[in-house]
Image: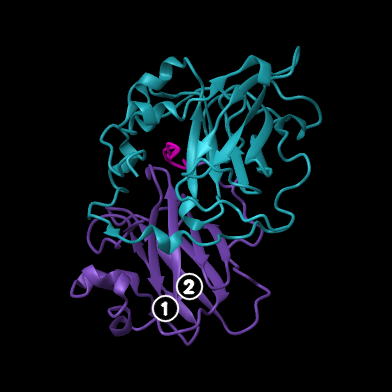
Amino acid sequence: MAERTPSQTVGPFFHEALRWAEGGRLAPDAPGPRAALAGRIRDGSGAPVADAMVEAWHAGARALGRVETGADGGFRFEFPLPPGPLAALDIAIFARGLLKAVRTRVYLAQESVVRTDPLLAPLQSSPRLKTLVATPRSSNEFEWDVRLQGEGETVFFAP
Amino acid sequence: MQADPPYFFADYGSTHLRAPREAPLAVPAALLDVPGPLVPPGLVGTGDNDLTTHGKSAPLGERMILAGRLLDADGRPVRRSLVEIWQTNAAGRYDHPGDTHDAPLDPNFRGIGRTLTDDEGRYRFVTIKPGAYPWRNHAYAWRPQHIHFSLLGNAPVQRLVTQMYFPGDPLLDLDPVFLSIPDPAARARLVATFEPRAGIEGLALGYRFDIVLAGARSTPLER
């Protein structure tokens, strides 16, 4: 086994260096219906996190999206709608003050169905599971806010 | 996973409102140990690994060769994988609108580089030695000279963002970002090795920085 290199914060000055060709558009040429996910990231005081980098991983399309948050902490991805009842995107957030990325998963599915995902078994009866479920705004528009710390803190994963 | 710093580190002020307080949900690493994203075509251009040729003439500073290998947890090369770097100029200033440090910009240095590893996991940049700069974390705080690295890896579990430091820098002993890594041996893995003969005689210093990612999925030999 080789000894792993530790993580450090991405800092506040990554923007030009980490420009991603297609930004928040994942697999733009993939066939089939598409969907959008938009939301805001807030810190422990409820203030927007305006200098974060957000990555969305779409396993089915083997596609990555990478965007920076705006002044309001907002981000947006647009992607092929993942098939199946447990449609989800894997999310990683990098920012000044995050010494390592936070990882989580956002489900584009009904909460009652998400509760059946074996991955989330330890949360089965927890009210915190709701933090992983996006709110549909239309048939293909979803909203999902992230709270890094404090009231309504998002469930983060440790792989 | 012990190599990484914790989310909350009292001496690094920006963690205070951003570090999650709840325990993370343990999920199998296998969830993200799957073939990762493909690098968008055209993202890495010829010459993107030479940061000294992006202006009209040479940038100020000590030219250096920065080379190393990208390896997985089994020590195997991570092949044809994206390496992105960014850094200050020789005066310690980022070419970024958010950097208000009162040090000069260098019109011949943007401080941004990209490359892909080769079949042995090797990468190589030509750049200049970055400068240290003050920040407001605590009294008399200066960040040690560093180069930011972003490694995509070949599986989502391998994704890593980190910083590389320089040997012998007295600021390392005072830097809360570096010191947030609990294990001194792990910290030391972020310090490049000075290798004069990895440089170019009469032209550039040489530094080596090898990087080890999580996971053990090396790239299959597909073309």
Identified by mark 1, the residue type is: Leu
The answer to whether one can see residue A72 in this image is no
Q: Amino acid at mark 2?
A: Leu
User: Which chain is tinted cyan?
Assistant: B
In the image, farthest residue toward the top = B202
> Is residue B97 depicted above or below B216 in this figure?
above
Q: Give the vertical position of B187 relative to B117 (above or below).
A: above
Q: Is residue A70 left or right of residue B84?
A: left
Mark 1 = which residue? A108
Q: Residue at x 45, y 47 (%)?
A: B214
Q: What element does badge 1 sit on?
A: loop
Residue B43 located left or right of residue B12: right
**Chain corresponding to purple in the figure:** A
Placement of the N terminus of chain A among the 4 image quadrants: top left
Q: Quadrant of the C terminus of chain A?
A: bottom left
Within 10 Å of disc 1 (Cα), the crowding (few <14, some 14-19, many 20+) is many
What subunit carries mark 1?
A
Q: Residue at x 69, y 58 (%)?
A: B222
**Residue A49 lies in the magenta stretch:** no
Instruction: Name the residue at the right extreme.
Output: B56
Q: How many marks?
A: 2
